[in-house]
């Protein structure tokens, strides 16, 4: 919304659609209607552990040598993904940044 001087006073006008509302004092009230929702998928290790690969990895908690592993993008898209490990023996979870 851009301020615009009219004969009747100050108004706010949308540059995209042309909608205009008179300005009351120096305040601008923004009204926005959300028309859609976004569903963000969440990775659940417990539900998919039978589909995950195992790897030889040393658990620093119990000394186990087998872990489930997966990669997940936790930072911005131009940075490498993070590798997660979950010990098969004690369920300890840790991460490794590439």
Image: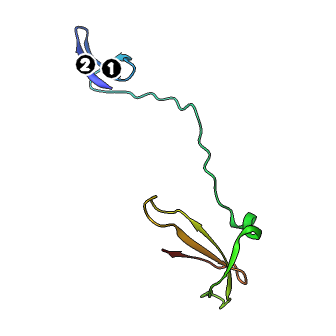
Image-based side of 74 in relation to 27, left or right? right
Instruction: Look at the numbered disc 2 and give the secondary structure of its residue.
Output: strand
Residue at label 1?
13
Q: Write the residue at 75% across / 63% down.
A: 47
Question: Is residue 6 shown above or below 24?
Answer: above
Image-based side of 78 in relation to 43, left or right? left
Residue at label 2?
4
Q: Pick the residue in front: 23 or 68.
A: 68
In the displayed orientation, state which residue is furthest to the bottom.
63
Q: Write the residue at 69% across / 67% down.
A: 45
- What is the quadrant of residue 68 in the picture? bottom right
Q: Write the residue at 71% across / 82% down.
A: 90
Q: Write the residue at 60% across / 50% down.
A: 40
As measured in the structure, the alpha-carbon distance from the residue carrying label 1 to the one carrying label 2 is 7 Å
Tell me the quadrant of the picture where the N terminus can be found: top left
Instruction: Look at the numbered disc 1 and give the secondary structure of its residue.
Output: strand
Residue 10 position, x and y percent, is 25, 17
Q: Earlier in the sequence, mark 1 or mark 2?
A: 2
Question: Is residue 4 shown above or below 93?
Answer: above
Residue 42 position, x and y percent, is 64, 56
Image-based side of 90 in relation to 26, left or right? right
- Circles 1 and 2: CB atoms closer than 8 Å: yes
In the displayed orientation, state which residue is furthest to the top.
7
């Amino acid at each position: 919304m851009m301020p615009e001087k009219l004969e009747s006073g100050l108004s706010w006008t949308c540059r995209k659609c042309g909608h205009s509302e008179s300005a009351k004092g120096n305040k601008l009230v923004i009204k926005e209607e959300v028309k859609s929702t976004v569903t963000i998928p969440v990775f659940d290790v417990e539900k998919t552990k039978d589909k995950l690969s195992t790897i030889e990895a040393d658990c620093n908690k119990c000394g186990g040598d087998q872990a489930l592993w997966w990669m997940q993008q936790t930072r911005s898209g131009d940075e490498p993904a993070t590798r997660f490990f979950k010990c098969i023996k004690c369920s300890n979870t840790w991460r490794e940044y590439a």
